[in-house]
Image (cartoon, rainbow, N blue to C red):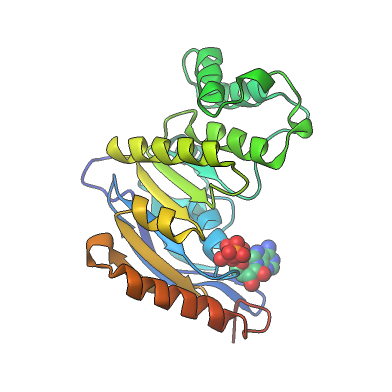
Amino acid sequence: MESHENALEVRHLRKAFGVIKAVDGIDLELKQGEFLTIFGPNGAGKTTLIKILSGLTKPTSGTAKVAGFDVSEGNPEMRKEIGVISHSTCLYADLTPLENLMFLAKMHGLEEPQDRSLKAIDEVGLSQRRNDRVRTFSRGMLQRLSIARAILHDPKILFLDEPFTGLDLHASNVLKEHLKKLHDRHRTILMTTHDISCGLEMCNKVALQVKGKFAFLESIEDVDRDQFEIMYFDAVRNNQFVMGIGTRG
Ligand code: ATP
């Protein structure tokens, strides 16, 4: 990717599931090295947005470029530039952590795949379980392995959908430290979370997604934290009255 290019360019992005408008006209630009946290009530379309950006689902209309690649084209080269933590773990249950990561390392053409895989497993504190089958793992252990999978190839751009889900306090702190280091190393990060203090502390841009749209998108230095919290909690409270959650008609 050329340095002058944006890491992320999203124009009028939409994704509908029948009458539900999960993503409803999102525009976004992120430069390389920026860290955007997206908050939003359940069903606001945050996961759908991340799935589109990571090439897991196609938009209904609009465009998204990630590291210069059009996400709709399914270019395998884009996968080398991104790391993803999502609800669907993309792990092979019948393989061990080491086998899972070595498979991925070879797919990415990484040098010394075993050493890279062992290092990533160690970083998420799973060394003692590296030869056990993934199907025997607890939720938190699966989440740790998903993190190892996302960072294995040191991607330029990370899409993190509620990455702290299921992690114990120690693993959460380790992940926070790791994300800070990645941000310092100019990695681009787009993260969704419901944890307001952690999400605000880490980012340099913050968005509030409501019914498929960005109701708010600002640089963190322009954000009044108290006002943002009020707006966020209002959005969450109003969402309780929306039948079926997503946007209709
Ligand atoms: P949460 O905070 O609960 O994780 P979210 O903001 O990530 O929510 P999404 O998972 O993106 O929200 O869902 C947005 C809307 O799209 C919801 O109404 C959801 O039911 C709907 N939706 C998502 N995926 C599908 C699908 N495959 N088929 C039908 N509807 C879907």
Determine the residue positioned at 65% across, 80% down: 19
Between 46 and 137, the one nearer to me in the picture? 137
The image quadrant where one finds ligand 1 is bottom right
Please say if 57 is above or below 82.
below
Residue 50 in picture, x, y percent from top left: 51, 55
Please say if 59 is above or below 147.
below
Residue 11 in picture, x, y percent from top left: 38, 66
Determine the residue positioned at 29% across, 35% down: 185
Please say if 24 is above or below 170.
below
Q: Quadrant of residue 13?
A: bottom left
Left or right of 184 on screen, residue 196? right
Residue 207 in picture, x, y percent from top left: 38, 66
Q: Quadrant of residue 214?
A: bottom left
- Residue 130 in view (yes/no): no
Q: Quadrant of residue 231?
A: bottom left
Determine the residue positioned at 54% across, 52% down: 162
For the C terminus, the quadrant is bottom right
Residue 100 in picture, x, y percent from top left: 65, 26
Determine the residue positioned at 26% across, 48% down: 5
- Residue 140 in view (yes/no): yes
- Seen as rendered, the residue at the extreme front is 169
For the N terminus, the quadrant is top left
Please say if 63 is above or below 108.
below
Left or right of 65 on screen, residue 74? right
Left or right of 187 on screen, residue 176? right
